[in-house]
Image: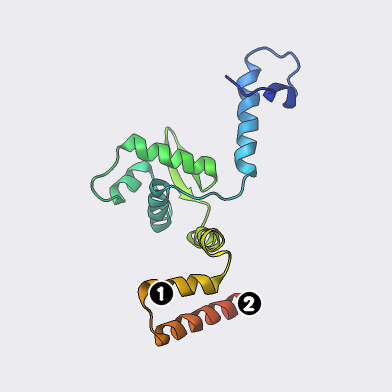
Amino acid sequence: MYPPGVFARAGYCGMDNFARPSIYRMKFKRQLTNKKMRELTRAEEQVMQILWGIEKGFVKDILAKMKDPKPAYNTVSTIIRILERKGFVKHKSYGKSHEYYPIVSKDQYRSFSVKNLLTGYFGGSFSRLASFFAKDRNLDVKELEKLMDEVKNDATDTQDT
């Protein structure tokens, strides 16, 4: 039921069986909060896009913003709870209902995703990424120069702040 050694590492010293699940949950919660940002699945990203747009909302609000065919209410609720465990979302309780809001901004996740894309597929090289898009999209020289100017402007903007 529990991984071997959990209770020995958690300081279990003969407490009754009622203490075991809470010790395990505390350890599991710590493991999740100590991890760095993780990639989102398509469904999780779809929910996050909606939450970033509406800033805060209940499951029914998120479901209302989804395109047809809409998933079941319980499916969206489960995805949001997973996002909460991953550290992307928090909630405010109002009785039995919860209002969810993002704690990771869209810009933070975008930056994380682009870094993963660069390191995973282009060896961390922006020039390889630009070269790939130039070949893939048949960009001409003017478009490439415009892209490089935007990158330079963004780089100077971030250095100024």
Q: Position of residue 158 (x, y in %)?
A: 59, 75
- Residue at disc 1, secondary structure: helix
Q: Residue at x 43, y 44 (%)?
A: 99
- Say above or below: 153 vs 94: below
Q: Position of residue 135 (x, y in %)?
A: 41, 74
Q: Relative to the observer, which residue lies in front, 39 or 83?
A: 39
Q: Is residue 130 visible?
A: yes
- As measured in the structure, the alpha-carbon distance from the residue carrying label 1 to the one carrying label 2 is 30 Å
Q: Is residue 161 visible?
A: no
Q: Which residue is mark 1?
A: 135
Q: Residues within 10 Å of mark 1 (few under 14, many from 20)?
A: few
- Residue at disc 2, secondary structure: helix
Q: Residue at x 73, y 20 (%)?
A: 12
Q: Is residue 138 left or right of residue 131?
A: left
- Say above or below: 16 vs 101: above
Q: Give, as a three-letter code, the residue at label 2.
A: Gln
Q: Which residue is mark 2?
A: 159
Q: Relative to the observer, which residue lies in front, 38 or 121?
A: 121
Q: Give, as a three-letter code, the residue at label 1.
A: Lys
Mark earlier in primary sequence (1, 2): 1
Q: Nearer the viewer, mark 1 or mark 2?
A: 1
